[in-house]
Amino acid sequence: MNKRKKLAFLCNNMRSLNGVERVLSQRLSLLAEDANYEVFLITCNQYGVPFSFPISPKVHHIDLATRFLLRCSYRGIYQYIDRFFSKRRYIKAIRQCLEYLSPDVITCVDMHVADLKAVLSINTNAVKVVECHSGRSSYFEDLKKIKLFYKYYIGLRLKTKMLHLVTKFDKVVVMSEAEKAEWKMNDKVVYIPNMLPSYPVDAKDVFATYHRVISVGRYAYQKGYDMLLESWRIVEKQHPEWTLHIYGSHDGDAGDFEQLQSMIDRLRLKNAFLHHATADVYACYKKSDFYVMSSRFESFGLVLIEAMSCGLPVVSFDCKYGPKSIIKDGKTGILVPQDDTESLAAAMCKMIDETKERERMSINARDEAAHYISDRIMPLWDAFYQSL
């Protein structure tokens, strides 16, 4: 009888309603239910807060409660002194935990320099894996929002150091073929797409019109909601009976929600609404007509296959890397040039105007999403772990 593989996953916490937490909860549960694996989830900042999504009781959870970034309570030089010693304690706690567990595979789900350093410093025979949930180029794209030069320089150094540490890991898991090619690390990089949390038995009524467009994601620079609102201003003038609904969490960049709300007021948009994140996002998909993605970058885009599984065609920027790997242009949705807000508006108007085309794409989108169900994706993970 083969020995069970012991898998350890290291992440910040499982408290938000974001896509990473959604798919990780599902995958860890399915792995733990498999007799071939023993699964450990190591969080650093859970502090007794319930998981946002259900996780199998067979997953062993350990919370280190030592996220050093939350310990910077002082000001001035004392803040940096506190951070220095907190970081050392943080890395030590991770090392001691992993050395005690002695897993066969150690996976960093969040790509933070301290996490990566801690795992790389352990003297072990375990295979060390990084899951890249944001996309390689995104780590530098995110710097474009920084206006102050010294902050940009500090961020650039940190990102460069982080990517250098990633190259020292045994395996890097990415979500698209396009990103795999960009890493230029040959067999060290493995492509495994995200899987659907669930494939609904019933989709939206293809022939019903709700006059409603939906988008889901964090209120953060990455999601490009500022560009979406610029586009919606054009759409609203042509189709005043249609509404745009954005559902997002507030754990993105500080102040983004308030800035977007101010933008809605400044542009005098009557039919654009910002909502809090919801745990029942599928119900929101089913009462919408199509999905729109305005992201500046995406490693995958879980929301795309979620919306498609409910029968929603998609209008999206052709950003790196996810949309092009998921959307079949003209069949399951419409891809437009990156950051081109006028083209995004035109594509939304086309989706609104051409009812028969929208119905056709709706059927195709749901069929395409079936490629991402767990029965198709979990064998890829099983083959990956068995190959290590």
Image (cartoon, grey):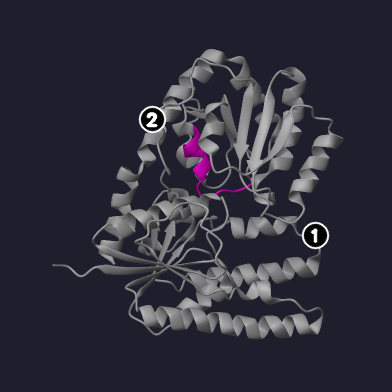
Give residue 138's quadrant in the image.
Answer: bottom right
Question: For mark 1, does the 10 Å Cα neighbourhood hold few (<14), some (14 to 19), or many (20 or more) residues?
Answer: few
> Residue at 51% of width from left, 73% of height from top?
116
Q: Position of residue 193 (x, y in %)?
A: 41, 48
Q: Position of residue 198 (x, y in %)?
A: 41, 40
Range drawn in magenta: 296-307
Q: Quadrant of the N terminus?
A: bottom left
Disc 2 marks which amino acid? Val
Residue 9: in sight, yes or no? yes
Q: Position of residue 95 (x, y in %)?
A: 46, 82
Give residue 45's quadrant in the image.
Answer: bottom right
Q: Position of residue 243 (x, y in %)?
A: 69, 25
Structural distance between the alpha carbons of marks 1 and 2: 47 Å
349 shown above or below 329:
above
- Residue 228, magenta (yes or no): no
The one of 216 and 201 positioned closer to us in this rendering: 201
Left or right of 8: which side holds 152? right
Mark toward the start of the polypeptide (1 vs 2): 1
Disc 1 marks which amino acid? Lys
- Residue 303, magenta (yes or no): yes
Residue at the disc numbered 2: 201
> Residue at 84% of width from left, 30% of height from top?
268
Left or right of 156: which side holds 13? left
Left or right of 274: which side holds 357? left
173 shown above or below 69:
above
Q: Quadrant of the C terminus?
A: bottom left
Mark whose residue sits in front, 1 or 2: 2
> Residue at 73% of width from left, 31% of height from top?
272
Tag 2 secondary structure: loop
Residue 147: give its label: 1
